[in-house]
Image (cartoon, rainbow, N blue to C red):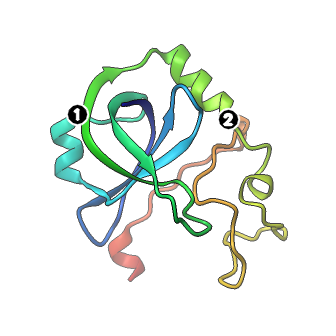
Amino acid sequence: MREVIITDLTRFSTDENVCTAVIDVQTGECLRPMPYLTSANCKELGMHPGGILKGNLTLNPVSENPHVEDASYSNLQFHGPCSSEKFHQVLENSLSQSVSEGFGVDFSENQKHIPHDQVANCSIITIKIPPHQLSIMKTNLSQEK
């Protein structure tokens, strides 16, 4: 049984699935429980970033880049929030020095995607940026379609 810290929950705009990223407390491995959990599963478990999950998670033995984090799971149980210190440490231990280094792809200035003919090293990374370089913009997804 693994103990993992939830680092990310990403809802898809087209369905009820949630992409979940977790980091194993003992090994530092980043895992993505597959198949995706649903929004209802996440709500039922009380999941949130910084939360602790315990259960059986096994990296898929045959995974192709970039989805090297994919893991099967069973018996996931939520065990409350971890401390802010533990969450910070888990994130610090998983840092990539840059987006390029993390994905193993050279990006041109202002490039915001990985070209379809390139394969990334992985699909999930953690980076650290100075807070003054972060901006959050609200997007109305219904107007983008």
Q: Relative to residue 144, is residue 122 drawn left or right?
A: right
Give the Cα distance between marks 1 and 2: 28 Å
Looking at the rendered structure, the kind of residue marked 1 is Gly
Looking at the rendered structure, the kind of residue marked 2 is Pro
Q: Residue at x 58, y 53 (%)?
A: 124
The nearer-to-camera label among 1 and 2 is: 1
Is 30 rendered above or below residue 138? above
In the image, residue 7 lies at what x, y percent?
Answer: 48, 38
Residue toward you, 20 or 132: 20
Q: Which mark is residue 131?
A: 2
Q: Residue at x 37, y 70 (%)?
A: 141
Is 57 rendered above or below residue 34? above
Residue toward you, 142 or 24: 24
Q: Relative to residue 129, is residue 70 drawn left or right?
A: left
Return the disc, 1 or 2, that comes first in the chain's sequence: 1
Q: Which mark is residue 22?
A: none
Q: Which residue is mark 1?
A: 46
Quadrant location, the C terminus: bottom left
